[in-house]
């Protein structure tokens, strides 16, 4: 069993009180990781004083070259990283690619964005404005990197992508990163940082790694620091009210739970291309990463008239999903990440079943390729509620596993929209319809409650990765239950790490600051 060390203050350090990381399919112990006793105040200080200046000295285009080198380093070690995702994450090879290739793709995308921003150290925000009758008195908003550290606390389900999607944006903006992966699946993030450190891809202090518990890291935050958190709403709520966060007005971005819905339009009749596209996406979201995706479809909203048919079609497809050790050929769905996650999923299924009935699967399953009784397995589970049922648990409790519920609606966009919005804010919901009027009405109802709306038309079916895939050019995050945060979205994501400042004064002076002749 190996010991994972943190990379802080430019060197590797071992912390105390380690937790054991296992293979979730076999429960074989793989590594230990602990952070007790590490000087996290000094770690943050090193990032601010060493990594920050080194990054800010570079232009956006030069920092883009760092991201490109990071993407290249990950790509060069792709097979090794995929193997780690299978062993420590319970990922099938296809799930592992989703995480690791997603990380590389996001880094490469932000490298491209950085190149397009050019050799500048500050960004202008909008056009300049005249502040008096004379054009001499001028105003211009600009954005500059904050001088603190960007603390990234990630969830267990995407150790590679979670690290990269946050780090890409912060580093491009010019902020040094202290990244903390969730402990249970930290081997992949640890190896990524090890590779980047070995190859000296980044300046010292630009990317630090904390493995093990978060300790007192957040008790040392200063006014120029930012925190980007991904995980449960409960932990997100704790972070928001930390005294240092409140007192120092530390910027906090929270990406939390979401009861993402997929709405089948009344026009998308069984057998149509749009209907098949819808089934494919629901099935993918239930089984990919064993449903442990913050964007996975949890509520399947269908017109009453076709509810029976949808249920039968989904059950038919779910029956052919092979659950087991993801290292074994032919396995389509692996285990969930930890014993406590398995317990949560089982309890969550029981809770949802109180609102309706179980139509496929059960909490216990017979996984292939593992000793009986080993591993944190749960088969795909489909539930259904009665038309018109209140189903309060279905609309409020996220089961972070391969579980979805069919919710029939009366047919119009009004009722569908009202049902979806009972989720109190989500990352993404989707509409599968070719009816423009139905789609527009539903978009207007859903938009205030979502970060992203996926329009599932047969016209994009061939090229679409479905609503569950977060694309770096589009915003990721959502209001309310989803945490109220916003990440990515192309250049938009940079603003979290930049300070917007209004320059007010003589136009020639401002033009000079902007580097304009
Ligand atoms: P979690 O228990 O909240 O943990 C998330 C991260 O927070 C881990 O790194 C964890 O470290 C750390 N943490 C735990 N206690 C903390 C504290 N008091 N202060 C600061 N950090 C603390 O969530 P999870 O079980 O890993 O992830 C599952 C949840 O994440 C689901 O609810 C899912 O919806 C959500 N999620 C959301 C998104 C999104 O983008 N919106 C993406 C993925 C997952 P340790 O592991 O060391 O405890």
Image: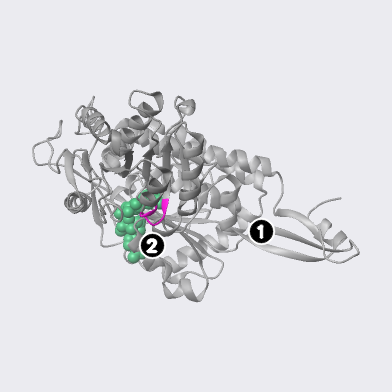
- Image: 8 above or below 437: below
Q: Position of residue 66 (x, y in %)?
A: 57, 43
Q: Which mark is residue 236?
A: 2
Choose top left, top right, bottom left or bottom right for residue 27: top left
Q: Position of residue 380 (x, y in %)?
A: 21, 38
Q: Position of residue 426 (x, y in %)?
A: 41, 51
Q: Residue at x 20, y 39 (%)?
A: 25
Q: Which residue in the structure is indicated by mark 1?
A: 144
Beta carbon of the mark 2 residue lies under 8 A of ligand 1: yes
Disc 1: CA contacts within 10 A as few (<14), some (14-19) or many (>=20)? some
Depth check: give the residue in front, 490 or 463.
463
- Image: 94 above or below 193: above
Magenta span dominant secondary structure: loop
- The numbered mark, 2 or 1, whose residue comes first in the sequence reads 1
Taking the image as drawn, is residue 280 in sight? Answer: yes
Q: Residue at x 29, y 33 (%)?
A: 306
Q: Residue at x 37, y 32 (%)?
A: 278
Q: Position of residue 92 (x, y in %)?
A: 29, 33
Taking the image as drawn, is residue 26 in sight? Answer: no
Q: Which residues are magenta?
A: 421-426
Q: Marks 2 and 1: CB-CB under 8 Å? A: no
């Amino acid at each position: 069993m190996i010991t994972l060390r943190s990379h802080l203050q430019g060197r590797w350090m071992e912390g105390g009180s380690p937790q054991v990381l296992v293979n979730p399919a076999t429960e074989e112990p793989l590594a230990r990781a602990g952070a007790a006793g590490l000087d996290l105040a000094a770690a943050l200080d090193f990032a601010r004083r060493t990594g920050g200046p080194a990054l800010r000295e570079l232009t956006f285009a030069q920092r883009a070259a760092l991201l490109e080198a990071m993407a290249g380093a990950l790509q060069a070690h792709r097979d090794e990283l995929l193997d780690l995702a299978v062993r420590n994450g319970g990922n099938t090879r296809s799930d592992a690619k989703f995480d690791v290739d997603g990380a590389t793709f996001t880094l490469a995308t932000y490298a491209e964005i950085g190149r397009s921003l050019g050799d500048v150290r500050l960004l202008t925000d909008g056009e300049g404005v005249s502040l008096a009758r004379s054009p001499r008195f001028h105003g211009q908003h600009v954005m500059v990197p904050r001088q603190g550290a960007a603390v990234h606390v990630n969830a267990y389900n995407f150790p590679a992508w979670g690290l990269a999607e946050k780090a890409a944006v912060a580093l491009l903006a010019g902020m040094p990163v202290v990244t903390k992966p969730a402990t249970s699946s930290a081997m992949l993030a640890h190896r990524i940082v090890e590779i980047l450190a070995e190859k000296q891809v980044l300046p010292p202090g630009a990317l630090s790694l904390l493995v093990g518990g978060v300790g007192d890291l957040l008790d040392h935050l200063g006014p120029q620091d930012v925190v980007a958190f991904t995980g449960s709403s409960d932990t997100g709520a704790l972070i928001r009210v930390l005294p240092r966060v409140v007192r120092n007005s530390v910027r906090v971005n929270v990406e939390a739970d979401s009861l993402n819905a997929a709405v089948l339009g009344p026009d998308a009749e069984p057998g149509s291309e749009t209907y098949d596209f819808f089934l494919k996406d629901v099935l993918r979201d239930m089984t990919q990463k064993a449903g442990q995706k913050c964007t996975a479809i949890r509520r399947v909203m269908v017109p009453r008239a076709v509810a029976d048919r949808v249920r039968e079609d989904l059950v038919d497809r779910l029956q052919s999903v092979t659950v087991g050790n993801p290292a074994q050929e032919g396995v389509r769905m692996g285990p969930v990440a930890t014993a406590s996650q398995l317990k949560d999923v089982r309890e969550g299924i029981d809770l949802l079943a109180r609102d309706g009935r179980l139509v496929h699967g059960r909490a216990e399953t017979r996984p292939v390729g593992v000793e009986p009784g080993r591993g944190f397995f749960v088969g795909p589970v489909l539930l259904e509620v009665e038309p018109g049922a209140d189903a309060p648990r279905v609309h409020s409790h996220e089961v972070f596993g391969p579980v979805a519920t069919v919710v029939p609606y009366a047919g119009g966009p009004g009722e569908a929209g009202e049902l979806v919005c009972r989720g109190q804010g989500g990352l993404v919901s989707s509409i599968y319809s070719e009816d423009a009027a139905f789609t527009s009405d539903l978009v207007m109802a859903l938009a205030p409650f979502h970060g992203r709306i996926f329009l599932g038309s047969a016209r994009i079916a061939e090229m679409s990765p479905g609503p569950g895939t977060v694309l770096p050019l589009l915003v990721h995050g959502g209001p309310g239950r989803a945490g109220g945060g916003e990440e990515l979205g192309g250049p938009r994501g940079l603003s979290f790490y930049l300070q917007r400042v209004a320059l007010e004064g003589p136009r020639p002076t401002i033009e000079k600051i902007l580097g304009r002749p």
